[in-house]
Structures are given as structure tokens and as C-alpha cells.
């Protein structure tokens, strides 16, 4: 790779002039500028922004840390790619680039992030899949790297976060089912320490209690957030002594595995068991009967996430003064046929 | 963020000793080392690897450039996440990290890559979705950045590449259909300038000619690589004057849209039209009748890609001396019910 010195030598022009030509300064004549740019292209000159960044203390790169677990891969989740386009639409205005940092599934996310911070390739970070206690938040706070979390955490009291409205989803699902006569309503939650599971169960428990239905821990089914987890959840549901009449799912692809296991046992979703799914996903649109679930725009979520992050970065805060506050992101109910049946009221 | 000087001041120890303690040098006593590491943790000290890299000329980071087009997002393609785990398993041995560089869908990939190269955040690059003529290859060659392409290109005569066996897939699909009496066999290809489309059609054309069937350009259907593209392909197929009896698809999710459009017209895949899909994908496993398609391990492809890249990097080449050659990656046929019907032989 050629540097500016080789370029100046090749053209027999001073380094200062070459630099001014490359940087579009007005005091270079047009012919010289053309010669410099042509030679730069020909010789493969690339400005050393790494050196520049070190002086300015910025890389103009924002990192998005994602888990690349076996589950994420097999389930081909479009969540992060969807959010990416929204983030980029905001960052592009400031000539900032987004890179994705996929944490290997056999590595501790805290250690991984520590190493990526040490590499100094990003000016700011977005972390996701926040755990109930998440040491990454401390790490970024202490390293004084601007960041935002996609997801709440007990560790995030001083951090800015945006999170999906898990309480709202749980509440509306429970109320919809209660209105149709259901009282034994099961719920699935992730088997990991991811924080959203706690929030989801709290919303469910609260909504039940508001309707005078006691919380029954045996109806909280902990499984992996995957199609396979859905299969497992159905399996456990069917083994319960007094079978619930409805189930609320936490993860978009669970419905696929759940339907399969139910049908294997001759239990028809929407007729024998009411099912409410979580996020609308392309893969679950083929389910028969169609799934009642919730919808959101990933692009819009990405836009808001980007604005909130920049509101926390001194260089950009002035443009996003209204975007700094923690945000609960709403989801809209999409009625399907999977929860249409009414429970017969006992005399 | 605290630097080494603040750390030394805080501990009242010389910078040299702090540095030796942090770097695990043996001439520091155990008690001092413990104090230094504890303070480093407490104060949020992070080694400035950017400075280190600048001196050593390496970042220990490998970039994987991916397109984040609207199609990729909507189709929730798991291709790159699948390859990532394989790449990471190779890179981890050398303490190299993989980052993903998602090119925004409204930006020219060449300009995007130029900027990312200028940012100097990666030691080497993997580029994918190679176009028939791909200026990114020239750019990386001239910038003297080690790279490998996932996909062939007319521009890649001096580059190392790995590519899926598109010819082999086209050939086996054609031969399987010919053996069942088909002679009017349609094929779908991407409407873009992506190179794989050219290779796929060449393989198809060659296989037909080997069996004495003339190539008919009207049977080559150019559509987007998406579910919607599959819908469109079926639509165009149904409008052809002499309808083909079979179709070969290029992209994994096309089958879903194609099935839908066919069924809307009462045309049953596997009974009225033989269908052979491309890569086996979780989302297409729910199709009825089941899809005949091809299978590969994304993880293993990632491993090979990683090994080939390192074989091209001076610092690692010695470990991968057998991995430097261009590679055609095989796919295995998965028979389904979508291509079972035989064409009646005319008397």
C-alpha cells in the first residue's frame, strides 16, 4: 500500500501539495489535483485514517455486538440485519460506519467485549441481549465509551437503554385470553439469564393478578429461544396434570416447533389450545391456523436506537437533544386464528 | 478511559513496572502484579491496542463484507451467520477477531470498501457476492491487503477464491430431470450482475447440450433472489406459451414464493411441474410437497474460507500450506417429492 510520501515522490510534487490536493483544499490548481488523484488511484494510495483517528481520538466506527450462538444461526434470525438498515440511515448523515461484532458462542461476552474495546476500533458501542446482571455495562462505563443497550438490565441503572415492550405484550396477551374465558394460561420464557425473560414473566404475573387469577409457577415453561424450544414447550405442556387452555410464547420461531409437537399429539392450535406468539416473523407466516402475534418495524427500531446513541455522544448530541431518554418500544397486535376458541364456562 | 500513566500514578509505581506487570513479564513480583491487575480492573484501564497496531502494522481483525440489502434482510438469510462460526473457529487459534462490515443497500460496494480500507481497522478482508466485473478485487490487490473472495469473478484472475459448485448443481438437476423425461426445463437466475448467475446458466446450458437439448433463452427467468422473486418466476412460467414441465431454482427461498403462485393457479409442484430448489434452508423445510434440493455445511465452508485466507497472509501461511488453492465447494443432493413426476413419453 502506498503512502503519501511515495505518491509525492512519484509525482515530484511536495507532500504538502499532495495532501492539500487529496483533501480538496482550494489552493491547488485543477490540473495538479487531477494528476494527484489519478496517481493515487493508479498506485493504490489509501489515506491512513488509523493514524488520523489516533490523533483525533475517534474512528468514526460504531460497533454492534451480537451473539452468534448456534441457536441464532440455525434460526436464521433477521432481527439484527433488520435493525442494521435503520442504524445505518442515521449514521450515514454523520459519515459514521456501523460494524457488527459477532461474539463467538464459546466465548464469554464480557471477555470478548473487553478485547474489542482494547482494539480501539470503535467510537461507541451498542450491546444487545442484556443479561439480568450484565458486566459489559460496567466495562463500557468505566472505559468511558459511549454506548447504549438494546435491552434493560439490573446493571443498567446509569445506562441509556431501549427495549421492546415485553410487559405490554404479556399484558395484552393475558387480557385477550381472559376475555375468552381462559384461566389456565401458560407462558414460555428463555432458559437463559437474559433479562427480557424476567420482564415478560412479571408482566404476565401482574396481568393475571389484576384479574384475580393466582400465579402458578408450574405454568412458566423455561425453554430455549428457538424452534426446538417451542417443540419442547409443547411437550412439557402436554405432560402437565391439568392442561392449560392457552399458551403465550416469548420468541418468534417457537410457534413453529410448538405447532408441530401439538399436532403430533392431535392437539389443534386455535381449537384445543389457544396460542399467542411473540414477534411476527416471515417464517411463521406459513403456519396454519395463522398465528396471533405482535408486529414492529425493525428499521424504525434501528433508527431510534441510532438517534439515542448519538444523543449520548458529545460530538452529535446537539442534533438529537430529544432522543436521549430510555425508551420502551411498542408492538402492535396482529390477530390470527390461533387463539379464537372460547373456553366453555362451567356451570 | 484510564491510560497506563494514570494507572502508574494511582499505584505510585513506575510506568515501566506497570507495563511489565500488565504484559505478564516474569521480572515483576507476584504481589505487585496482583495490585496492578486489580487497579487496572477497578479503574477501567484498557490497553491501547490501536497504538500498538499502528506500530506493528496489524489490527488482528479480519473483516467480512456483507450486503445488507432489503432482500437479505427480509429473507432473513442465515448464510453469513452460518459461515461466521466456522471462520471464528479458525481465527480463534491465532487470536484474530472477525468483524462483519454490512454495506448499506444504497451505497456502491466499491466506495464502501474503499472507505473501510482507509479506516485501517482490518488486517485482511473477505468479500462475498462477487459481481461478474468486481472493482473491489482491484482495490484490495492494489492496497496490498490480503483477501479472499467467496465467489468467482472475471476480475479475480489473480485472487484466491472459494465458490459453491453452481455448475455441479445445475448439471445434476438437469440430468435428474432429463432422466424423468423432461425436455422443457426452465431455470431461474438472479436479475443482478452477481457472477454466480452466469456460472449457473452455463452449467445448465452445457448439461442440456450434452443431452442434445437445444438451449432456449426464453426458459431462463431472471428474478430477484427472494421469496418474492420465486413468486414472480412462477408467474412468468405460467405465462409461457409452451409451458415447461420442470424448473430449477437458484436461491433457497425462491421455492416458497414459487409454490404459492403455482398453487394459486391450481398447478401442483411435483405433480404438474417438477421443481428442484437450490440450498436446503430451514424455512423451506415446511413446504408440501417436500423440496428436492441441495445441502452443504455452512460451518465447514467457513472453516475452509478461514484457512484459505490465512494461507494468503504471510504471518499464518506456514500453518495452512495446503489451503491456498482456489476451491469449488460441493453440495449434496437431498431428494424430495417436488420432482417425482415423470413426463409421459410421446409415441
Image (tube, coloured by chain):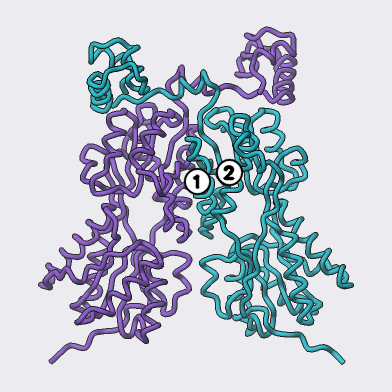
Chain colours: A cyan, B purple
Left or right of residue B130: residue A237: right
Q: Are marks 1 and 2 on the same chain?
A: yes
Left or right of residue B158: residue B129: right
What is the number of callouts on the image?
2
Left or right of residue B182: residue A128: right
**Is any part of residue A263 visible from this angle?**
yes
Residue B155 % position (x, y)? 22, 42
Q: Residue at x 48, y 37 (%)?
A: A97
Position of B176 relative to B266 (above/below): above
Q: Which element carries disc 2, helix, strand or loop?
A: helix
Residue B141 % position (x, y)? 28, 32
- Of B256 and B290, nearer the camera is B256
Q: Residues within 10 Å of mark 1 (few under 14, many from 20)?
A: some
| Residue A20: quarter of image | top left
Q: Residue at x 46, y 30 (%)?
A: B121
Which chain is disc 1 placed on? Answer: A
Position of A88 relative to B38 (above/below): below
Residue B191 % position (x, y)? 29, 60
Q: Which element carries disc 1, helix, strand or loop?
A: helix
- Of B2 and B118, nearer the camera is B118
Residue B233 % position (x, y)? 31, 71
Q: CA distance from mark 1 to mark 2?
A: 9 Å
Residues tagged 1 and 2 counted as in contact (Cβ below 8 A): yes
- Of B141 and A162, nearer the camera is A162
Which chain is disc 2 placed on? Answer: A
The residue that mark 1 highlights is A89
| Residue A119: quarter of image | top right
Q: Residue at x 48, y 42 (%)?
A: B88
- Of B5 and A309, nearer the camera is A309
The residue that mark 2 highlights is A306
Amino acid at each position: 500500500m502506498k503512502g503519501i510520501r511515495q505518491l509525492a515522490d512519484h509525482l515530484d510534487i511536495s507532500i504538502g501539495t499532495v495532501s492539500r490536493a487529496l483533501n480538496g483544499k482550494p489552493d491547488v490548481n485543477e490540473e495538479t489535483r487531477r494528476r494527484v488523484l489519478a496517481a493515487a488511484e493508479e498506485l493504490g494510495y489509501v489515506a491512513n485514517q488509523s493514524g488520523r483517528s489516533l490523533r483525533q481520538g475517534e474512528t468514526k466506527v460504531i460497533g454492534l455486538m451480537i451473539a452468534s450462538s448456534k441457536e441464532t444461526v440455525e434460526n436464521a434470525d433477521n432481527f439484527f440485519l433488520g435493525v442494521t438498515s435503520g442504524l445505518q440511515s442515521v449514521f450515514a448523515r454523520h459519515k459514521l460506519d456501523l460494524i457488527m461484532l459477532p461474539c463467538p458462542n464459546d466465548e464469554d461476552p464480557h471477555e470478548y467485549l473487553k478485547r474489542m474495546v482494547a482494539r480501539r476500533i470503535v467510537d461507541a458501542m451498542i450491546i444487545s441481549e442484556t443479561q439480568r446482571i450484565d458486566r459489559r455495562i460496567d466495562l463500557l462505563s468505566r472505559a468511558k465509551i459511549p454506548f447504549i443497550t438494546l435491552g434493560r438490565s439490573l446493571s443498567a441503572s446509569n445506562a441509556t437503554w431501549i427495549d421492546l415492550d415485553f410487559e405490554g405484550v404479556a399484558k395484552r396477551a393475558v387480557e385477550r385470553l381472559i376475555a375468552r374465558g381462559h384461566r389456565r394460561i401458560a407462558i414460555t420464557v428463555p432458559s437463559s439469564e437474559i433479562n427480557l425473560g424476567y420482564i415478560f414473566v412479571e408482566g404476565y404475573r401482574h396481568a393475571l393478578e389484576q384479574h384475580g387469577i393466582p400465579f402458578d409457577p408450574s405454568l412458566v415453561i423455561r425453554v430455549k429461544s428457538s424452534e426446538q424450544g417451542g417443540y419442547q414447550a409443547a411437550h412439557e405442556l402436554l405432560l402437565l396434570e391439568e392442561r392449560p387452555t392457552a399458551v403465550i410464547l416469548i420468541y418468534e420461531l417457537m410457534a413453529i416447533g410448538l405447532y408441530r409437537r401439538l399436532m403430533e399429539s392431535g392437539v389443534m392450535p386455535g381449537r384445543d389450545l389457544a396460542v399467542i406468539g411473540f414477534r411476527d416473523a416471515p417464517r411463521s407466516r406459513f403456519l396454519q391456523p395463522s398465528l396471533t402475534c405482535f408486529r414492529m418495524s425493525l428499521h424504525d427500531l434501528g433508527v431510534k436506537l441510532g438517534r439515542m446513541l448519538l444523543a449520548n455522544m458529545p460530538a452529535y448530541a446537539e442534533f438529537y437533544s430529544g432522543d436521549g431518554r430510555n425508551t420502551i418500544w411498542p408492538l402492535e397486535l396482529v390477530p390470527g386464528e390461533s387463539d379464537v376458541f372460547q373456553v366453555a364456562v362451567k356451570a
